[in-house]
Structures are given as structure tokens and as C-alpha cells.
Image (spheres, helix red, strand yellow):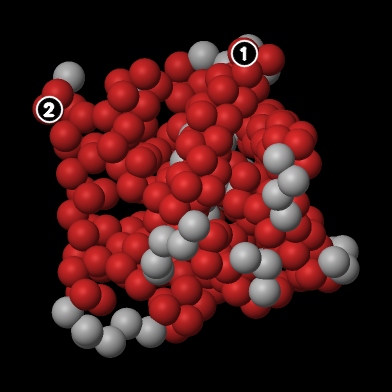
């Protein structure tokens, strides 16, 4: 079991460590460029090729999508109550409780722990979370709710294309499969390297509050993921994915939105760093439980 866990965790640590060391050596790393490449090209390609090759059924897709939405709703309700009770800035902190690092960290772990079938399910969670983050999340941060951002999420187009291919039963030409496989292959390692770069650049402010918020995110995430898995009757692969994706640390995008709209960005940055470091320490136990 130790060897199995090491084989899953070590690649994550190595790739993130490369990014951390890279930026600490004052080497250039254009985060905006890398993020744009991953968001507009890499992730959509990965989503398309994974869903097409795994041949996920429509029922499996929709069930995981509803479970993902239920988990995010659970995070919203619980954290909203806690934040209001403690007098915290809800607009600043609730997005960090709602949206986990299910992309940069969750997708690599799902692939390494469960293979392509696990990655396909994790992609469903990632897509649902992204849709909510770029609509509800932006609305909370900016004070203006809008669904126009959906048209600017390339991952949705990849989902629609993959579902159309699966429903039609037509096998795409090799030129499409090979191209999307090649482009999608860059996504996971670059996500982890970018995560390491973010950890190297962000600073922890208001340590006590950031620590408590980080612990709330991780404990709540596991508990809600467990509850959703039970409620949907998930077992095996589906259960492992929903719990693991729910228990991921605070997503880096939450800091970017907090910085853009000036909602306690230093404290949100602290939550990203501390929740990720704590998550690294608890990963062996989490993986042991879900696999």
C-alpha cells in the first residue's frame, strides 16, 4: 500500500516542486500565458479526448454532474452559516469555500489514483465547478450576477463536442484524436507546475484566520463529499472521486478574483497556501481512504 500511495503522490510533489523551485530561483514564468494556454487549449483538449476514449455514458455524466453541484451547494450553505456567525466578509471568503483546486490538483490525483475512468469523472466535477465559479463566483465577488461568462468557457464546448461524439457513435478521425491527445497531454503537468509557482509567489497574511479557514475548507470538503457519496449511493470509483475532489484545497482562481475585486486578497492568498500545504500533509490518509 505504501508503494501504491508513493506512486500517486510523488509525481504531484515533484511537478509542483519544480514550479516552486523555478520561481524561487527568480526564473521567468508567465502565469497569464500558461493559464491562457491551459484554459483555452490544454484543458478542453484533455476533456474531449478523455471523455471520448473512456466512452462515459450520458447517465454516468449527468449523475456525477448533479453530485458535483450538490457538493458545491453544501459548501455554500455550511460556509455561509459559519462566515455569518463569525462576522466574516462573506463576499471575500465564501468563494474560497465553494471552489476547490479540483483542476490543478484534483485532476492529476484522479488520473494517478484511478486512471482514465477516474479522470473522466473528475473532469465532470471540474467542469461543473468551473461553470459555477465563472458565473456565481464572479457574481459574488463583483456584486453583479451574469451568465454571459459561460460563452467564454472553452471547456463547455469540449464537453458538448464529446457528448455529441459519444451520442452519435461516430469515431472521430485520427487527426483529431491524435491532436487533442497531444495537446491535452500538456495540461496536467503544467497545472501542477503552475500550482508550485503560485505557492512560491503567494504570501500568508493573517495567519490565524487563514489557518482556521483552511481547516474549515478541508474538513468541510471531506464531510460534504462523504455525505454526497452516501446520498447518491456512490461506491468504488464514483465515491472516491466525489470525496477527493470535494476535499481539495482552495483554488488559486479564488485569489485572482479576490485581488481583482479587492476582497481581502492577502487573506485569501494565505488560505490558498495553507490549505494546499495542509492538504499535501493529509494526502496519504485521504488517498488511503478513497482507494
The CA span between labels 1 and 2 is 29 Å
Q: Which residue is mark 1?
A: 230
Could you tell me residue 118's position as x and y percent? Answer: 43, 35
139 relative position to 281: left or right: right
- Residue 83 vertical position relative to residue 139 in the rendered view, above or below: above
Q: Earlier in the sequence, mark 1 or mark 2?
A: 2
Q: Which residue is mark 2?
A: 3
Occupied quadrant, residue 198: bottom left
Residue 50 in view, yes or no: no
Could you tell me residue 13's position as x and y percent? Answer: 22, 50
211 relative position to 253: left or right: left
Could you tell me which secondary element the residue under label 1 belongs to?
helix
Task: Name the one closer to the observer, 198 or 114.
Answer: 198
Q: Quadrant of the N terminus?
A: top left
262 relative position to 289: left or right: right
Instruction: Name the residue at 46% across, 62% down.
Output: 205
- Residue 261 vertical position relative to residue 276 in the rendered view, above or below: below
- Residue 252 vertical position relative to residue 142 in the rendered view, above or below: above
Could you tell me residue 207's position as x and y percent? Answer: 44, 53
Occupied quadrant, residue 104: bottom left
Amino acid at each position: 500500500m505504501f508503494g501504491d500511495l508513493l506512486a500517486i503522490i510523488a509525481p504531484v510533489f515533484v511537478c509542483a516542486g519544480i514550479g516552486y523551485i523555478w520561481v524561487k530561483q527568480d526564473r521567468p514564468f508567465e502565469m497569464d500565458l500558461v493559464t491562457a494556454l491551459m484554459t483555452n487549449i490544454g484543458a478542453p483538449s484533455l476533456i474531449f479526448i478523455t471523455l471520448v476514449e473512456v466512452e462515459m455514458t450520458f447517465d454516468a455524466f449527468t449523475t456525477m454532474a448533479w453530485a458535483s453541484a450538490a457538493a458545491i451547494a453544501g459548501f455554500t450553505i455550511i460556509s455561509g452559516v459559519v462566515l455569518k456567525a463569525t462576522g466574516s466578509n462573506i463576499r471575500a471568503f465564501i468563494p474560497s469555500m465553494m471552489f476547490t483546486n479540483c483542476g490543478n490538483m484534483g485532476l492529476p490525483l484522479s488520473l494517478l489514483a484511478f486512471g482514465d475512468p477516474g479522470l473522466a469523472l473528475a473532469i465532470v466535477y471540474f467542469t461543473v465547478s468551473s461553470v459555477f465559479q465563472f458565473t456565481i463566483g464572479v457574481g459574488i465577488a463583483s456584486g453583479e450576477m451574469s451568465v454571459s461568462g459561460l460563452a467564454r468557457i472553452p471547456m463547455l464546448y469540449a464537453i458538448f463536442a464529446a457528448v455529441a461524439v459519444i451520442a452519435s457513435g461516430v469515431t472521430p478521425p485520427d487527426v483529431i484524436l491524435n491532436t487533442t491527445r497531444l495537446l491535452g497531454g500538456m495540461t496536467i503537468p503544467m497545472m501542477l507546475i503552475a500550482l508550485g509557482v503560485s505557492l512560491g509567489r503567494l504570501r500568508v497574511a493573517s495567519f490565524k484566520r487563514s489557518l482556521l479557514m483552511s481547516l474549515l475548507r478541508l474538513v468541510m470538503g471531506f464531510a460534504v463529499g462523504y455525505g454526497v457519496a452516501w446520498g447518491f449511493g456512490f461506491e468504488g470509483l464514483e465515491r472516491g472521486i466525489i470525496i477527493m475532489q470535494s476535499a481539495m484545497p482552495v483554488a488559486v482562481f479564488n485569489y485572482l478574483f479576490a485581488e481583482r475585486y479587492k476582497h481581502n486578497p492577502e487573506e485569501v492568498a494565505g488560505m490558498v497556501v495553507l490549505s494546499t500545504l495542509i492538504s499535501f500533509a493529509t494526502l496519504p490518509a485521504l488517498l488511503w481512504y478513497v482507494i
